[in-house]
Image (cartoon, rainbow, N blue to C red):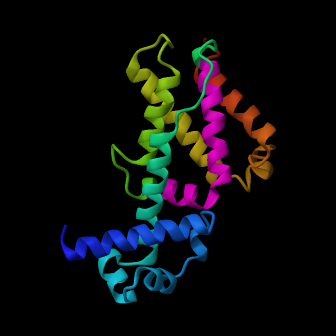
Amino acid sequence: MKKSELAKENIIAVTINLIQEANGEADKITTRAIAKEAGVGIGLINYHFESKEKLLEICVQRIISDVIKSFKPDVNHELSSIGRLKKVTKMVTSFLIENSSVSKISILGDMNSPTVADNTMKTVKGLLFSMEDYSIPKKDKMLLSFGLTSILQAAFLRKDTMKESFGFNFNDRKEREAFIDFMIDKLFGGKQ
């Protein structure tokens, strides 16, 4: 690896550590703190990443991608496909709430620069595993999974206004889980 690539990867690694130390509150991290920890000048950070926001987005995408790759929910296979989907979806939304700052950066990054392999699409594909024995064509499952993921992302991003707009508190686990049950039942027609 070239010296400039090593420096770039070091800056990313240091920034990921700082994000984790800040419990995902990336807005508390300064470019100066990143430069100091990485042992580089602020100019090098701007050279490689253009801005602190772009650097944070890259780091958050890596963090979330690693979480998605390692996410192996312990789901009872005695549950129906829809039951498994509800359980996994509730676990995913709990992660979003517990890691609000990095989740918001990841979702907005995917919306601003969508790719077929971004974290949104990894989530869509992950939800498909819950539905392996759901008897509809794979293309339809994929579209429904994308729809569900999109609804959850929108609700998460609007979590602080959901009570006022729709009468439920997305930040409250019980109300959020009732919303998830409702949305999955509506999307999947209550089919098992």
The structure residue drawn at horizontal position 65% and vertical position 28%, both measured from the top left corner, is 87
Q: Quadrant of the C terminus?
A: top right
Instruction: Indicate yes or no whether the magenta region holds residue 86.
Output: yes
User: Which residue is more in the foreground, 79 or 152?
Assistant: 79
The percent position of residue 184, horizontal first and vertical second, equals 63, 26
Q: Which residues are magenta?
A: 82-109
- Residue at the spot 67% in from the left edge and 51% down from the top edge: 97
Secondary structure mainly formed by the magenta segment? helix
Relative placement, left or right, of 116 versus 160 is left
Number of numbered callouts drawn: 0
**Near-viewer residue (113 or 13):** 13
- With respect to residue 119, does 18 lie above or below? below
Residue 145 position, x and y percent, is 50, 30
Horizontal and vertical percent for residue 173? Answer: 77, 41
Relative placement, left or right, of 12 versus 129 is: left
* Residue at the image position 48 percent from the left and 25 percent from the top: 129
9 relative to 65 in the view: left or right: left
Can see residue 37? Answer: yes
Q: Residue at x 45, y 72 (%)?
A: 14
Based on the displayed image, in which of its 4 quarters is residue 177 positioned? top right
| Picture layout, residue 84 above or below residue 51 | above
Is residue 158 something that shows in the picture? no
Vertical relation: 179 (above or below) 113 = above
Task: Tell me the quarter of the picture where residue 85 sits.
Answer: top right
Magenta-drawn stretch contains 99: yes
Instruction: Judge by depth and name the residue closer to the eye, 65 or 51.
Output: 65
Residue 188 horizontal/vertical position (percent)? 58, 20
Q: Furthest residue to the left?
A: 2
Q: Quadrant of the N terminus?
A: bottom left
